[in-house]
Amino acid sequence: MSGCRLTRWGAVLGIAMCASIPGANCAIAQISSDGTLPINSNVNKQGSTFNITGGTPVGGNLFHSFKEFSVPTNNTAFFRNDADIQNIISRVTGSSISNIDGLIRANGLANLFVINPNGIIFGRNASLKIGGSFVATTASAIGFDNQGLFSASTPNNPELLVVNPSALLFNQIVAAPIQNNSANLSVNNNRSLLAVGGDVNINGGSLNAFGGRVELGGLAGEGTVALNANSNNFSLNFPDNVARANVSLTNGAKVNVASAGGGSIAINAQNIDVLGKSSLRAGIRPLARIDDAQAGDVTLNAKGTVRIENSSIYNAVFGSGKGGSLRVDTGKLIIQDGVVATATISSGSAGDLVVNASDSIELTGSSSSNGTIEIDIDIPIAFLFNYPVSVPVPIGLFSASINAQNLPNVSSFLSSLPTASGDAGNLTIETGRLIISNGPVVSAGTLSTGHGGNLTVKADLIELSGTSANNSPSYLLTTTNKVPSGLRNETAGYGAGGNLTINTRQLIVRDGAWVTTGTGGEMPGGELTVNASESVELSGTSSENIPSVLASGTLGSGNANKLAINTKKLIVNNGGIISAGTSSSGEGGELIINATDSVELVGTSKQGLSASQIKDLIGFGGALVSDFVEDRPFPSGVISGTGNEGNAGNLTIDTGRLLIQGGAQASVSTISAGDAGDLNVRASSIELSGTSLESPKPNDIVGRSLLTTAVGEGSTGKGGNITVNANSLTITDGAALAASTSGQGDGGDITLNANTLSALNDGQLRTSTFGSGQAGDITLNIPEIQLSGSTSGVFAQTSSTGPAGKLTLQPLNGQTLTVNFFAQAQISASTSGSGKGGNLTITAPESIALNGNGILAATSEGVGSGRAGDVLLGTEKLTISNGMRVSAATNSTNPAASGGNLTVQAAQLNLTDGSSLEAGTTGQGAGGDLTLRTGKLAVENGAKITVSSTGSGRAGDLKIHANSVYLNNNAKITADTTGGGGNIFVRSPWLLLRNQSSITTNARGSGIPGGNIAIDGLDGFIIAVPSENSDISANSVDFRGGNVEISAQGIFGIQRRNTSTPKSDITATGASPQFNGSIELNTPGIDPNSGLVELPTIAVDTEVAQVCDTPGYAQSSFIITGRGGLPSNPTKDVAVPDGVEVGWVSLKPRGDAKGGLRLRNDQSVISKPISNMPERIVEASGWSVNKKGEVVLTANVANTSRRSWQNAIACNVPHANK
């Protein structure tokens, strides 16, 4: 046994040495019979021909047995068999290697088997001329079903072996190899060529079986390989439980079975190497026009590794019919600068491409400058490609339909492609790890009218990275256009693109790699679906700044299809892009992201793109970023857009947490006639943070982290709407949630449904228009908002002819709304152009609280002529506190601009702590009106309600309708104007002014009268404290004072005066006394000064009727102070400020009475002696006033008519509002 092992190892070593020495003459032995058969083989050499006759025929089989069998260079081994022989089976029983460097011939259609356990070498001059199939093997024996063996290691008699061969038996520990050194071995069409070792090495040359079958394989140990016979064709079945040998194709070796139909290749080994511009070719050859032709399959089965370097394997259709499949089953697949493809270049359909690699798949691009491999193609193929015979092809895996004139020029292919009308096949990959780097492509697409195939990838880990040396990205695609490297499934012609489905634990796309589906023709592109149980990550750019991309798009009239990502965590950073869009008339696809944990969009690229790179990027996959600027770093992002008349698809993000940081974006946009899609976000928490610039412009979104929809300059398409549903939204450090239009198309709306919103440190939520299109509306359904920073806030703006959008705030589902402002934060609806400003509406069913040092305003700014929008606040209870300003104003210098109106409707309005409600103008335009409708109005602690003009524009009017008005502690209702107007109207039955509070109109400027004040008390009261300097004034510094008209049931504590005093005044002063305005106080027939009667300094004694004896502790007295001591009207003050206070007196005790009351001061009181009481006690039943004005209790009341002492109100007393 050990001798046998030595012999076998010696054979392997001998073949290796012979193969490694160029020009070596290894044909030591030639052909000789071993004499072991019943009818021995006869070998007769005539010249350079070995004529082989004899042999033992058994049925259709003819057996030969040789001691050695070698064919020297330029010699021929000619088996001269009878025509009815089906199989010629020859064995070598000696110990020498068979070295074939000449021609092997046989008669008729017989199949030829050459069995040499020592090894077989085919030299560069070897060739075949046989009618049947050819099998070369280093097996020990051939089996014939159950009839026995024909053994080369232990020669036996084959007399009973009448059936076809059925098995190859290996009993060696190490089977000998088979090597082809540059030989061109061909069998007739539709025949088989099999090489079964040991190791099988095809070192240059070719193996051809057009329409037939080439099968290579071997075993590394003892075992049996089943041999299946089908007429004149054979195939093998390798056992799974036996170690296999290796198969390699090197130095430009070729295996070709392409024909008008049929043609299959199978390789079974431990490891398969296809190296050095070698190739496996199957499919339908050019000019074949058999419509129902079916090409054969290509199958590679390796227990270990399949390695393809600078080589190709393809199953292609160049004519009519249907392509066969290409299947790779292995532990590990490595493709470096190589191609594995099914394709059609004609009307036929490409076959499927299936890759199963239990460990991993690694595709690596070229390090050379051209980034392609050169495939030597037969002349008819070169004609179809309109290319030279040597055609550059991308590196990778492909199933595709190709138009020869669109043949891509990139780095690596794993593909299934068609051209013309043929359909691409499906491409299926299943592996533990798929690694694609430096430019390879995995594709099932179409570049013609054919439909693209489906690309399905299943792996635990998928990683795509980098580009080729010529900057083609790594690709995974189903597409129809340019073919950089990666995973792609696209259609560039008229065919429909196939679907691309990725099932993995983790997908990584980095350093410029791409995963894409799309269409460049009339038919729709395929869907792109990523299912990643753990994470999806797109990161960085290539050295030439090509972004990492996951995209679905259209470049033609066909519609792009959906892009869906389902994962736990999605990360896009450093210039990575996820995109769905259209650059033509086709509709863009929908982009859907479901990430149960989080979506993180972070940062920008390190460098900017050139103009041509931007064009390519926008053209492919609809990568339309609002701030794509030449040579400026571009944002990482999730993008849906349109660059032409086709409408873009919607973008939907559903996640637990959304983070957009450092200048990244999630955006929908249009830069042409097509409408942008909608952007829908649902997340528990959303954080937009930071910028890519140190100091972004306040009104510019460039460089900001964005959740945005945009209409580009000159675009007629409409912007998409943004809808956000979240528990909390935080916008901070320069980030923005924005909708804008710079074209004719209207901008999109923003709707936010959340529990809390925070915009801090230049964080902005905004809609804007810079063109003729209308800006979108903002609707915030949020119960709690926090804003901080002078450039932070919520903005609805126009700076052009287009009108601004509306801005609406209201609680989501609750009853209350709270907005806290810090550091001059804003909620603003404004115009700085000719477009009308948007309205600002804030409502809540129960209450609204606006708190802090901030601004809520609708304004007109700059030099624009647009009218500012209106402000409306409506709720049950409105509280404005801590310096908050609510304003409707125009600050424009354009006289056509005007301020909006400010309207408040609330059952209760509290305005405190320096806060204000304002309607004003600082320019030439008119200010708007300010109207309050409330039940209870309280203005306190320096707060104010004002209409004003500080320019030449006319101020609006201030109107208050309330059940009660309370002004306290320097509170103001005021109209200050330099341009006229500014009237105040208050209608309330209860008006109280305290502590230097005021209702005033103040005018400045030549010919500018003071505004009018009209107060309608509605038969109620106007009350002030005289000493607290609370005023009602209508004044003008430079002209006539305004008019004051007050109608009330009573006016207390405030007096009409000609000039202002430290007391509480009612004034209407002008530039001089003759220019004073009028004051009209209308009360119902009562002198407003009637409460100012002087009291006597000494009280008048009054006799009290003695009805019973009173002890000291119960003594009483009744004192009349005189006619002026009581007000004539019970609605007047009891304690008149100018009256004299009368002290209390102590009653003197009578008899034994003890105690008694004492005076509040020490003043003495004159008392009249009390007369004796009559014996009969009569109880007083009334009282009367005597001539002295004294009140006398009496038992006899005069019969007088009973009427009120108060005068009846005259019917002709006017009210202030009449």
Image (tube, rainbow, N blue to C red):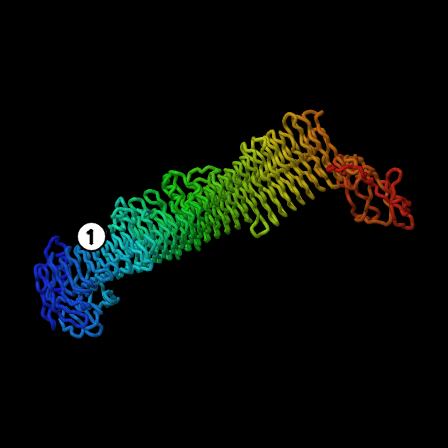
> Is residue 194 found left or right of 438 in the rendered image?
left
Q: Is residue 1166 above or below residue 653?
A: above
Residue in front for this viewpoint, 1164 or 943: 943
Quadrant where the C terminus is found in the figure? top right
In the displayed structure, does residue 315 sit left or right of residue 1168? Answer: left
Judging depth in this view, the residue of 32 and 505 nearest the camera is 32
Quarter of the figure with residue 62: bottom left
The correct choice, above or below, for 1189 with respect to 687 in the image is above
Label 1 neighbour load within 10 Å: few <14, some 14-19, many 20+ = some
Tell me the kind of residue under disc 1. Answer: Asn
Specify the quadrant that holds the N terminus: bottom left
Q: Nearer the viewer, residue 618 or 1061?
A: 618
Q: Which residue is mark 1?
A: 251
Query: Is 1079 rendered above or below residue 620?
Result: above
The secondary structure type at the circle numbered 1 is: loop
Residue 148: horizontal and vertical position, in percent? 19, 73
**Can I make out residue 592 in this image?**
yes
Viewer-side residue, 567 vs 1094: 567
Q: Position of residue 512 (x, y in %)?
A: 34, 46
Q: Could one spot residue 761 in this view of the protein?
A: no
Residue 606 lies left or right of residue 1134; in this view the side is left
Residue 70 picture location, percent across and down:
11, 61
Task: List x then y, in percent, for residue 995.
Answer: 66, 37
Q: Looking at the image, how many numbered discs can be counted on the residues?
A: 1
**Residue occupying image coordinates x 65% and y 37%:** 958
